[in-house]
Image (cartoon, rainbow, N blue to C red):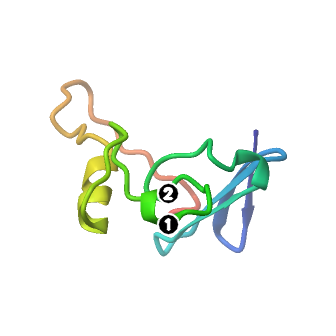
């Protein structure tokens, strides 16, 4: 895996199949090769060419709407975790 920055966007690359970009504006770009077709899951769908089955939650069940899909795939909130609080500021988050 490689990590690079271009025009303030951070790019994570797992060659040759997957590239993910994170911009300071909060935009996420995902590029996958055809080799990953039918092997993906998550908020971007499963990349099998059939949009009708893209809205699946982590449990594999179809959900009714995009809002329900994003809620199902949302990462847990870790603000309740106790321990020392440290603030990290990454240079690419300006």
Q: Splitting the image into 4 quarters, where does residue 32 fall?
A: bottom right
The residue that disc 1 covers is: 51
Residues 32 and 94: in front is 32
Q: What separation in Å lies between label 1 and label 2 (alpha carbons)? A: 8 Å
Give me the residue at 25% from left, 37% from top.
Answer: 78
Give me the residue at 70% from left, 46% from top.
Answer: 36
Q: Which mark is residue 71?
A: none
User: Is residue 30 placed above or below 61 in the rendered structure?
Assistant: below
User: Is residue 55 placed above or below 85 in the rendered structure?
Assistant: below
Q: Residue furthest right?
A: 16
As drawn, is 84 to the left or to the right of 34?
left
Q: Secondary structure at mark 1?
A: helix
Query: In which quadrant will I find the N terminus?
Result: top right
Q: Nearer the viewer, mark 1 or mark 2?
A: 1
The residue that disc 2 covers is: 45
Mark 2: few, some, or many residues within 10 Å (few <14, many ≥20)? some
Residues 78 and 31: in front is 31
Give me the residue at 26% from left, 66% from top.
Answer: 65
User: Is residue 6 placed above or below 39 in the rendered structure?
Assistant: below
Lower position in the chain sequence, tag 1 or tag 2: 2
Measured as percent of width and height from the top left, residue 27 is found at: 51, 71
Q: Secondary structure at mark 2?
A: loop
Counting every numbered tag in the picture gives 2
Measured as percent of width and height from the top left, residue 21 is found at: 63, 61
Give me the residue at 27% from left, 55% from top.
Answer: 63
Q: Is residue 74 visible?
A: no
As drawn, is 48 to the left or to the right of 69?
right
Residue contact at pointers 1 and 2, CB within 8 angstroms: yes
């Amino acid at each position: 895996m490689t990590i690079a920055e271009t025009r303030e966007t951070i790019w994570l690359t797992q060659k040759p199949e997957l590239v993910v970009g994170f911009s300071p504006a909060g935009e996420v770009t995902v590029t996958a090769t055809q080799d990953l077709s039918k092997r993906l899951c998550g908020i971007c769908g499963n990349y099998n060419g059939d949009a009708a089955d893209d809205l699946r939650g982590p449990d594999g069940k179809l959900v009714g709407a995009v809002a329900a899909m994003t809620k199902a795939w949302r990462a847990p909130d870790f603000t309740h975790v106790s321990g020392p609080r440290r603030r990290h500021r990454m240079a690419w988050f300006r």
